[in-house]
Image (spheres, rainbow, N blue to C red):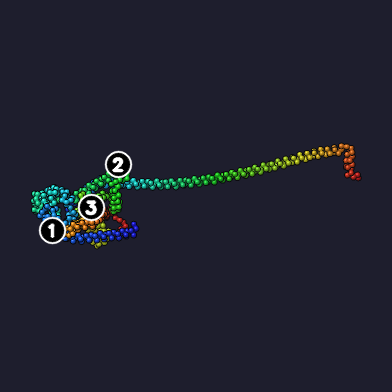
Amino acid sequence: MELVKPEFGLVFWMTVSFLIVVFILRKFAWGPILSSLKERETSIEDALNAAKKAKDEVANMKAENEQLLKQARNERDMMLKEARDTKDAIVNEARAKAQTEADRMITIARETIQNEKMAAITELKNQVATLSIEIAEKVIRQQLASDEKQRALVNDLLKDVKLN
Amino acid sequence: MCPENAKQSFIKMKISKLVILSIICFLTISFNTASFAGEHGNVSVSETHKAAPAHGEGKEKLNAGKLIMDHIADSHDWHLWGHTSIPLPVIIYNGERGWTVFSSARFEHGHKAYQGYRLNEKRKIEAVNETTEMDAHAATINEALTAGSYDISITKNVVSIFITIAILLFVFISVARAYTNKRKGLAPTGLQNAIEPIIVFMRDEVIKASIGAKYEKYVPYLLTLFFFIWINNLLGLIPVFPGGANVTGNISVALVLAVLTFIITTVSGNKNYWQHIFAMPGVPKGVLVLLTPIEILGMFLRPFVLMIRLFANIAAGHTIALSFFCLIFIFGQESLYGTGGGIGVSPLSLVFTVFMSMLELLVAFLQAYVFTLLSSVYIGAAVEEHHHGDHH
């Protein structure tokens, strides 16, 4: 029974010393320890949050960049398409212009050729007439070189003439 | 955890419990018969002891029960070895003689009365009529004065408490300094590193988990409580000075701790807490007549059980460890098997003692943990706010 009977002295010392220890430790140990722990925990949490925020930001930027890139690509495509269209248009226009020009020049050429041809023909005709006269003159001169030949010719000519 | 694993460990625990239980049963039986055998001789020993105080000569018969009880109980000097012990201050107050302070060496282990006081056979201080220095057995007890005296001597347990406090203060103030000095904000090192996880565990898993949002106010008390009990338990496992005192296994110490928890619980009790005790919501009036006394009883029963649990566990641990040791000397008695018996039993005894010490290491932590956990749970119940989703 001695064992389960509290003793005044021990209860007294225990109460006094334990309470003093609680107060001393609260002021000099638990206070600083717990506040430092808390501080550290909040700083770690803050750091983690900041890291998360940074990560989000990076992700956002990445998305933004992609968006920009996509836009740029679209723009480039559009510009290329426009350029191609313009080029086609220009080429087509040039081709049409060239065609008409060519046609026009051909027509002019043809007319010129025609005129030249006519002139040439006329000239040729004149030349042929002159030549024929000259030739005829020479032939006649030849044939009428002697009296004999003049007679033969006259005979020959007279052969065909029916003296009616 | 996987339920298979839990089941397995549960079975393992059951088996180990069974083993321990059977060992204890076996030893209790053998121990009882042995001490019974020894008791006959013992009467004569104490007789001769009284007649011839010059002890230590001749073979004293061992009374294991007395030895263990002497160890479990508090004492006015700290026994080191053989006949060497550290005398401790005796401080007594009563209305008639005022304060009396002297060294416990004056009692000469109970053989002398000094300044009107002596040690009785239970090693408690008694007031005697004679105030001169004289033989203790010749003095006559003054019952009225004994009852009116307050003995606040610095006993073995008080010294042990002081040692624990010194350790607590040294450890935690130096740890606290590590947080505030030039290493502030850096990663913890050394002792700080060892202590911090325990503090964090106690704060997060025990105190915060049990009390809830308003936990911060109670952290200093509960942490001090935990480390005080734990360090005391561990010191109690060391067989030599400065350990070996049975502080937490002393009912007075357990009582103080339990009462502190009770006071804190009662003082912090909010409206919801008292309402649950005196008028449990949602319970018919007729049942309340029955329930309220039970709740009021429970209010006191909880700290009471807290006290008994700590006291009984630690005292039992000391008792069992010592019992195993005593076996050597019980078997070594001339009336049993002699020296050979003692030597023969000693390996077995050693194995059991080592095993018990290992178990006690676990118990030392466990009891400190359980005491703190339950204190937190009680405080948590007292500060808990009313839940709207009623489920009583």
Closer-to-camera residue (B113/B152):
B113
B372 to the left or right of A53? left
Looking at the rendered structure, the kind of residue marked 1 is: Val
Q: Residue furthest front?
A: B340
User: For the residue labelled by badge 2, is the local secondary structure a helix, a strand or a loop?
Assistant: loop
Dot 2 alpha-carbon crowd within 10 angstroms: few under 14, some 14 to 19, many 20 or more: few
Question: Label 1, on which residue?
Answer: B43
Residue A22 locus on image (x, y percent): 23, 48
Q: Who's the residue at 44% across and 46% down the image?
A: A62
Residue B244 locus on image (x, y percent): 21, 52
Considering only vertical position in the picture, is A150 above or below B366?
above
Q: Who's the residue at 78% across and 39% down the image?
A: A127
Tell which subunit mark 1 falls on: B
B337 to the left or right of A155? left
Residue B364 locus on image (x, y percent): 25, 53
Question: Label 2, on which residue?
Answer: B182
User: For the residue labelled by badge 1, is the local secondary structure a helix, a strand or a loop?
Assistant: helix
Closer-to-camera residue (A81/B289):
A81
Tell which subunit mark 3 falls on: B
